[in-house]
Image: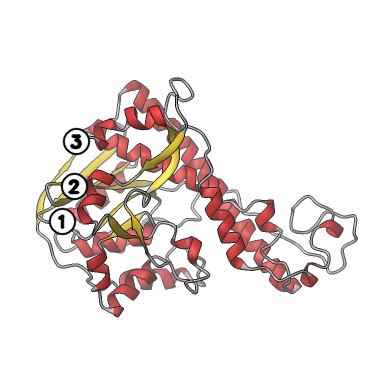
Amino acid sequence: MELPPTLHPRAHPTDEELCWCLSGQPYSECHKNREKQKKANPKQALDILAKQFRKKIGCLHPNSPEGCSGKIINSHTIQKSGPLKTIAKNGEVYSMKGAGDRLVENIGKLIPQKKGISTVSVFPGFCAHHDNAFFSPIENGKFEITRENCFLLHYRNVCSELHAKKSMQFGEHILSIIDSGRGKSDQFLAQQQAADMNFGASMAEKELEASRDQLNAYWIAKDFSSISFYFIEFENQLPFVGSFSATPKFSFAGDKIQDWSEEILKGVSFSSVNFDGKSGFVISSTDQDLMDLLSSELEDLLIGNPSNILRWSVSNAENLAFNIDWWDHLSDKRRKHILDLAMIGMPVDDIADEIELYLSAVEVLPKARLSRSLKL
């Protein structure tokens, strides 16, 4: 199994030897006297990452570049005219997306921000023609539960996550400022953590590229039999929506599914859909065993309740949006629990901390009756 690089700073490196941080530059042009430089502002690195996320990497349509026309545009991952519009207040929601860009100002916490629904869940992933034509069946008119439509939700989530992984790696500019003005031991810790994060993002990018290649073949063949889809709907509208592709650590019940250090990870897609004021979710995966586990838990009325679905979603992704009135009226205890769950996946001292956090769920949503569910 491939492991992240381990950095080995020397006590007295020569000016000519390559720097210990693996930048490829001579020590004299890289980390020599870095502790004497102006102290880094962590917000600088976050601002660069935020700018990277807006970078356009080309159209991700299965036939691209064939048939591409128009500029790369922002594609909605959560349907603007459906789920987002339904929970919005004056065209706005609280959004978790981009919360990582504000970690410094929010004192290390991922806190949702009020945003308009036109910008809340977008990424620059498709040319204008393919975004309109490819996703028309799930964006225009009432959503129909078909295998092809569920595939489109799954595909868009994978592409969004692929774009995010391509965008989140620390480049030379960030690596050169994250530890300036800090002592040598802090320089090492900062550079090692950055190397670990870059390695993880790079590995995830490779897996997502392979997944997208596989999905492209399914689309071209119009054969979606290798993907398992599950749809669940409640009798009323819940105050949150989301859309993401993830490799979950836990099931809805809090049972451990996998560890992110495993060589092959199980991926799942999650998408909100809306039917006449009723909340629906489409969950899909190419891993049949994983889908059997998740769908059986959702069928269990004690496990598949709205609070557990929200808990699972917050712990897996930031592409979530909340109704403004609902969030504002949460108690401090319930709001803190959601914000703590959002930190799962961030650097922690012990995996047991995450398990304990996940299992200490607070019921933040009232019980809601199931309207229907089905496997496709």
Q: Which residue is mark 1?
A: 237
The amino acid type of the residue labelled 2 equals: Asn
Estimate how packed mark 3 is, as few (under 14), some (14 to 19) or many (20 or more) residues with alpha carbons within 10 Å.
few
Residue 101, horizontal then vertical, whole percent: 50, 61
For numbered disc 2, what is the local secondary structure?
strand
Residue 205, horizontal then vertical, whole percent: 52, 43
The amino acid type of the residue labelled 3 equals: Gly
- 2 and 3 marks in contact (CB < 8 Å): no
Label located before the other in sequence (2 or 3): 3
Q: In this rendering, would 344 be left or right of 117?
A: right
Q: Which residue is mark 3?
A: 141
Residue 23, horizontal then vertical, whole percent: 75, 52
For numbered disc 1, what is the local secondary structure?
loop
Numbered badge on residue 188: none
Label located before the other in sequence (1 or 3): 3
Q: Residue at x 23, y 74 (%)?
A: 329
Q: How was the colour assigned to the protein in this rendering?
A: secondary structure
Q: In this rendering, would 355 be left or right of 150?
A: right
Estimate how packed mark 2 is, as few (under 14), some (14 to 19) or many (20 or more) residues with alpha carbons within 10 Å.
many
- 2 and 1 marks in contact (CB < 8 Å): yes
- Spatial CA span between label 2 and label 3: 11 Å
Residue 374 figure quarter: top left
Residue 251, horizontal then vertical, whole percent: 31, 58
Numbered badge on residue 274: 2
The amino acid type of the residue labelled 1 equals: Gln
Task: Name the foreground residue: 239 vs 342.
Answer: 239
